[in-house]
Image: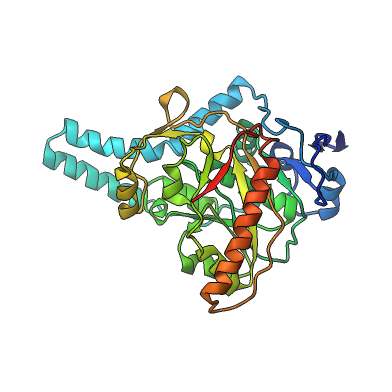
Amino acid sequence: STQSHGELRLNLHPMSSATNTSKQYYFADADVVQNLSMEFDKKLVMSLLKVADKPFPPGSLNRITEISFLEELQCLLVFMVFPGSLVFVPLLFCSFFLFLKFWTAVAVSATLIAILSGVPIASQWPPSLIAHAWLPRLMCRYFSAKGVFSTMFDPTQKYVVVAPPHGVFPFGNVIAKFAIPRMFGFCIHGLGASVLFRLPVVRHVVTGLGMIPADRDSAKLALNRGESVGISSGGIAEIFETHQDDQVVVLRDRTGFVRLAMQTGALLVPAYIFGNTELLDCITDSSGYLQRLSRKLRVSVTLFWGRFFLPVPYRKPVVAVMADPIPVPHVQDPSADLIAEYHGKFLSSLQELFDTHKASYGWAHKKLIIK
């Protein structure tokens, strides 16, 4: 059914699953959510949503949104810049040493690095710019982005949202960052690998999007200001798990996000991004050498590609599902047992979240493996 409000509308599929739970589920199409103003209006949002008490029908969340040839061409050009710069900038420097004399290549490389490093990094782009820019809306349509959640989050609270899997690049997490302010009334800082903030071109994009380095101090600083953070916790390890038949997340021994939530008094939110692992392919090796090297260098060392063997992601639907927040004790120095207790609750909630919605995405046959 559809309920309209001027140009705003949210399409919801009727529920028909035989599984009956006590939870309520909301559905939001991110393409439509982009039309909501950055001025959060809970009554308006709620008026556009309908509530159901069963999961969505099998395959109902993996439909591809139609886009025009011009829209698709614009997306391709954007992707050639980012994440394309992660491929083309290193290749450019390598070409200097292949086709120029050694010291000439050194001089050209040093000059180019100095020029790129000298370009000042602006602060985060204004939320109003992101709200009305064509690019976020276009990305939502390209990825056929959707969101499913079971509670309306309180904008006065702060959250640690942990949303695996990472995939080669967490496009779904970026899309969620565009939609969350309109749906729930709070902004969220994504945590990114520190190396991203040192790479030419890339550092300007991630800073403009409001991302912060994935270190404890940066995350605590944001949370202590009353802001929320989003974590794609698997990082480099999950990049090399993208070719598995089942879905793999690396979380079994990663408890830092639980400690972070406890120390800052934030609510812990399990989330899962269906489709993140389907957007790009990458080279992996059975020996694990590339993964070990990547961990040592703190940056992924592999080649990746998508459509046309270019750094252009495939047109696969991206669906972000979010569980109810988990309240954690506000403790500055939590014990190992306390952290383990709430880490277990988080993993159980994540497993339930995946199992509840996997059929709706068309993955009824897949399992979630937590390493």
* Point 44% across, 36% down: residue: 81
Give x and y (percent) for residue 188: 61, 57
Q: Is residue 282 above or below residue 158?
A: above
Relative to 192, residue 97 above or below: above
On the image, the x and y values in percent for residue 5 come to 86, 40
The x, y position of residue 290, in whole percent, is 31, 43
Tell me if I can see residue 129 in this picture: no
The residue located at (29%, 50%) in the rendering is 114
Report the number of discs: 0
Task: Tell me the quarter of the image containing the N terminus.
Answer: top right
Q: Which residue is nearer to you in this view: 102 or 14?
A: 14
Would residue 185 be found to the left or right of residue 350 on screen? right
Q: Using the rendered view, name the quadrant where residue 95 is placed.
A: top left
- Confirm whether residue 269 shows in the render: yes
Closer-to-camera residue (245/28): 245
x then y, percent, for residue 47: 87, 47
Q: Residue pushed farthest top?
A: 69
Q: How is the image coloured?
A: rainbow
Whether residue 264 sits left or right of residue 105 in the image: it is: right
> Residue 72: which quarter of the image?
top right
